[in-house]
Image: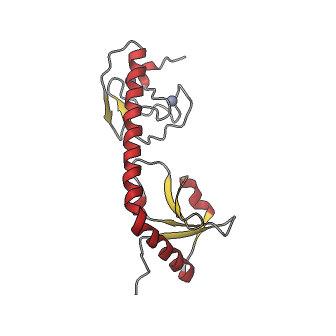
Amino acid sequence: MGKLHENLWVGQSRNSRDVIVVFDPELQIPGQSHVNLFSLLSNTIMVFSRKLRNSLRPLTGEKRDSAVLRYVAWKEQHAQDFVSSSLTKLKGEKEALVLLHKNRVDGLGLPYQGTRDNHRAARRSTHCYACTELLDGTFDIACSACGWLICDSCASCGCGYRPK
Ligand SMILES: [Zn+2]
Ligand SMILES: [Zn+2]
């Protein structure tokens, strides 16, 4: 017999054993840089950095099964709402970023040429030159004029870049 809900991964924190989380690929939202995990302790989805994986050890056997059952009960009632509201939120954030980028280009006195979704946008550096935030490409939107990835934090692109 196969494992109960084989696609689910259950982990326990190495630091605090109370913390047990369930990873479900179906609850991950494309375009999000973080991971959504179900927390048994709070009985809800919590957002974690991808690096967290290293601080978890996988649970197996009965402990895994009981966590899976708790999660599946939650999922039946709440997963759909969670996914649709996450998608709506992401879409809103993306639209806001595009608008902010337009304002920036306008502010530079340059003709606005729009944006494009581009998973291969030129990344001149790993950090934004304007705000120094990490360019993690959550939205992967590029400026059509310069082809640079638009910073998720401040909406800067290459158009405003002035080499020192
Ligand atoms: Zn920035
Ligand atoms: Zn640009």
Q: Is residue 30 visible?
A: no
Q: Is residue 24 visible?
A: yes
Residue at x-position 45% and y-position 19%? 160
Q: Nearer the viewer, residue 2 or 74?
A: 74
Q: Nearer the viewer, residue 100 or 145?
A: 100
Residue at x-position 36% and y-position 39%? 120
Tell me if 125 is positioned left or right of 7 in this view: right
Image position, residue 75 (x, y; %): 42, 67
Question: Image quadrant for the N terminus?
Answer: bottom left
- Across the whole image, how many numbered discs are drawn on residues? 0
Tell me if 85 is positioned left or right of 48 in this view: left
In the current view of this chain or complex, which residue is farthest to the right? Answer: 15
Image position, residue 103 (x, y; %): 40, 21
Q: Quadrant of ligand 2?
A: top left
In the current view of this chain or complex, which residue is farthest to the top? Answer: 109
Image position, residue 53 (x, y; %): 56, 60
101 relative to 83, above or below: above
